[in-house]
Image (tube, rainbow, N blue to C red):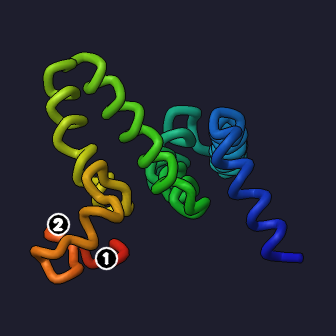
Amino acid sequence: MRTARVLLLRLRSLFRQAKVDRELEAELKFHFEQQVGENLAKGMTAAEARREAARAMSGLARVAEECRDARRVMPLIDFARDCRYAGRMLVKNRVFAGVAIATLTPASARCSGWHPTRSRASTKSPWTGGRSRLPACSRCWRA
């Protein structure tokens, strides 16, 4: 039951990030105002009470960042941002995109097991003793 709840909360943090951040900011603001109220009750001036509350909470930005890190979804969010950035750069630099695609496509096709020159005729060659002359990746199926 606990793992299901944690999973649901992490999915919520992942897909409703703006709403969760707004809730976090509201909660931190509430705690800050409570601390200011306690300081005012002790007899401090308004400026002193706010300054002391900020010092006591060790900076709201740091606390908010620690709460975001506790969700454990930041690596996924960072990966998604990196992918969007890479897509924007590939659209912006079309020559680089073309060279990257032309270079990576044959390599990924070869390691996935598909190759235009790989057929029964090329793997059963009498010159190679029944083995393919194409180099094989360690993860690829062998001829």
Q: Dot 2, how many residues are within 10 Å of its Cα: few (below 14), some (14-19), or many (20+)?
A: few
- Residue at the far right: name it: 1
- The one nearer the camera, 81 or 19, is 81
- Is residue 38 visible in this depiction of the protein? yes
Label 2 element class: loop
* Residue at image location 24% in from the left, 63% down from the top: 122
Label 1 element class: loop
Measure how far apart labels 2 and 1 are at the Cα level.
9 Å
Horizontal and vertical percent position of residue 105: 27, 44
* Residue at image location 71% in from the left, 53% down from the top: 11
- The one nearer the camera, 3 or 104, is 104
- Residue at the far bottom: name it: 129
Q: Which of the image's four quarters has the N terminus?
A: bottom right
- The one nearer the camera, 74 or 27, is 74
Q: Which mark is residue 134?
A: 2
Going by the image, does 30 lie left or right of 134? right
Quarter holding residue 49:
top right
- For label 1, the residue is 143
**Which amino acid does the dot numbered 2 rest on?**
Leu
Mark 2 touches mark 1? (CB < 8 Å) = yes
- The one nearer the camera, 141 or 63, is 141
The image shows residue 126, relative to residue 6, as above or below, that is below
* Residue at image location 33% in from the left, 23% down from the top: 88
- Is residue 33 visible in this depiction of the protein? no
* Residue at image location 41% in from the left, 32% down from the top: 84
Horizontal and vertical percent position of residue 53: 55, 48
Mark 2 or mark 1: whose residue is earlier in sequence: 2
Q: Which of the image's four quarters has the C terminus?
A: bottom left
Horizontal and vertical percent position of residue 25: 63, 39
**Which amino acid does the dot numbered 1 rest on?**
Ala
